[in-house]
Image (tube, helix red, strand yellow):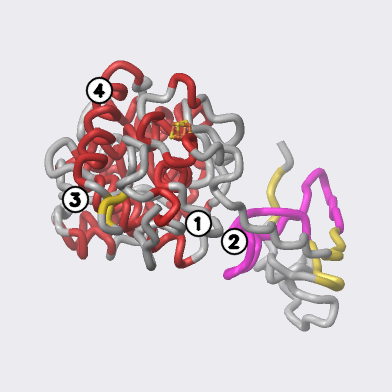
Amino acid sequence: MTKKSSGFGNDADEFSPDSQNQGCPYSNNELDTGWVSRVQDKLATWFEGAQRTLPWRQDRDPYRILVSEMMLVQTTVTAVVPYFERFLARFPDVEALATADEPDVLKLWEGLGYYRRARQLHAAAQMIVSKHGGVMPMDPKQIRELPGVGRYIAGAILSQAFDLPEPILEANSQRVLARLIGWRGEQGSSETLRRLWGCAERLVPSRGAGNFNQALMELGALICTPRSPSCLICPVSEECRARREGLQDVIPTLTRRPEPLAASESSIVVRRAGRCLIVKRGPGGLWEGFWEFPTIHLEGANPGKRPTRDDTDSRWCPGDDRAPGRDRA
Ligand code: SF4
């Protein structure tokens, strides 16, 4: 077996192009062009017949793609669909969202989590209107200037709305690519991301980029799942290094979860004349701007950036104008 130095993937030497493995990803330490076009073709054919009908796939409207991608961060497609439909019914275009009041936007996001994303989406809509005349820019640099839009969401919009050959890399495609090339680096590490972004760049076709990117993600969602991937029915199983080496259950190499942080807090319920005191959570912490019973931090972690008992700010006194009261429904 030919020994190689630093290959595109790790241990490329164990999977050299002159081995008996026909579906080898590598040739001279680069992704093999034949392998690249086979993966592109097989995924495109599979996606045509297997893709799910999703509301943001009805057209190539970049606004709908932006909303769906912001909602899909850390959330499943099934959970997002009803939120997406409600959100689009209320804010059908970027102008409607840009001119909305933030509480209305947050109300429609309620239950999805990651509320910072809702605020970023709102701010992105405002920037599209104020800076780009209400039209989504097609320039990668300008798209990435929008609040909350990183390389992945920019790639999704550019490829799906404008069919530009921009790669994407999110949780599903990371897993699929790591398995396809047999990459055993730690998930989420900078080296892993560099390798997988490189792989995604190499694989994205010059035409049909949007469908290809969606096919990668769809394969990860339906077939190449985190646990027990369905290799027997996978359209690219012949091209997959992890399957060949029996590593599909150990790739990707997971990072250790951080230890949970202990926190101690104290809340009080104040009722007077049929009304109940609630306060707004302060800036910069967890769930910023949301309402709750007055709560102080006692000890341990303080992700909500709550005041402590020594805090001299008297904003929570029931008689204070800044402590808003709301009728309890
Ligand atoms: S063969 Fe298995 S591990 Fe490889 S891409 Fe397909 S489902 Fe994933």
Question: Residue 241 or 19: which is nearer the viewer?
Answer: 19
* Local secondary structure at mark 3: loop
Between the residue at mark 1 and the residue at mark 4, the CA separation in whole angstroms equals: 37 Å
Say few, some or many: other residues with alpha carbon within 10 Å of mark 4 (under 14 / 14 to 19 / 20 or more): few
> Looking at the magenta stretch, what is its main secondary structure?
loop
Between the residue at mark 2 and the residue at mark 3, the CA separation in whole angstroms equals: 28 Å
Say few, some or many: other residues with alpha carbon within 10 Å of mark 2 (under 14 / 14 to 19 / 20 or more): some
Counting from the top left corner in percent of width and height, residue 71 is at 45, 42
Residue 201 is left or right of residue 224, and the answer is left
Evaluate if marks 1 and 2 touch, with contact meaning CB atoms under 8 Å apart.
Answer: yes
Answer with mark 1 or mark 2, whichever residue precedes in sequence.
1
Say few, some or many: other residues with alpha carbon within 10 Å of mark 3 (under 14 / 14 to 19 / 20 or more): many
- Residue type pointed to by label 1: Arg
Evaluate if marks 2 and 4 touch, with contact meaning CB atoms under 8 Å apart.
Answer: no
Q: Which residues are magenta?
A: 268-294
Residue that mark 1 sits on: 116
Answer with mark 2 or mark 3, whichever residue precedes in sequence.
3
Q: Is residue 99 above or below residue 282?
A: above
Q: Nearest to the eye among marks 2 and 3: give it.
A: 3
* Local secondary structure at mark 1: helix
Question: Residue 70 or 251: which is nearer the viewer?
Answer: 251
Between the residue at mark 2 and the residue at mark 4, the CA separation in whole angstroms equals: 45 Å
Answer with mark 1 or mark 3, whichever residue precedes in sequence.
1
Residue that mark 2 sits on: 288
Evaluate if marks 1 and 4 touch, with contact meaning CB atoms under 8 Å apart.
Answer: no
Counting from the top left corner in percent of width and height, residue 35 is at 26, 40
Report if the beta carbon of the residue with label 3 is closer than 8 angstroms to ligand 1: no
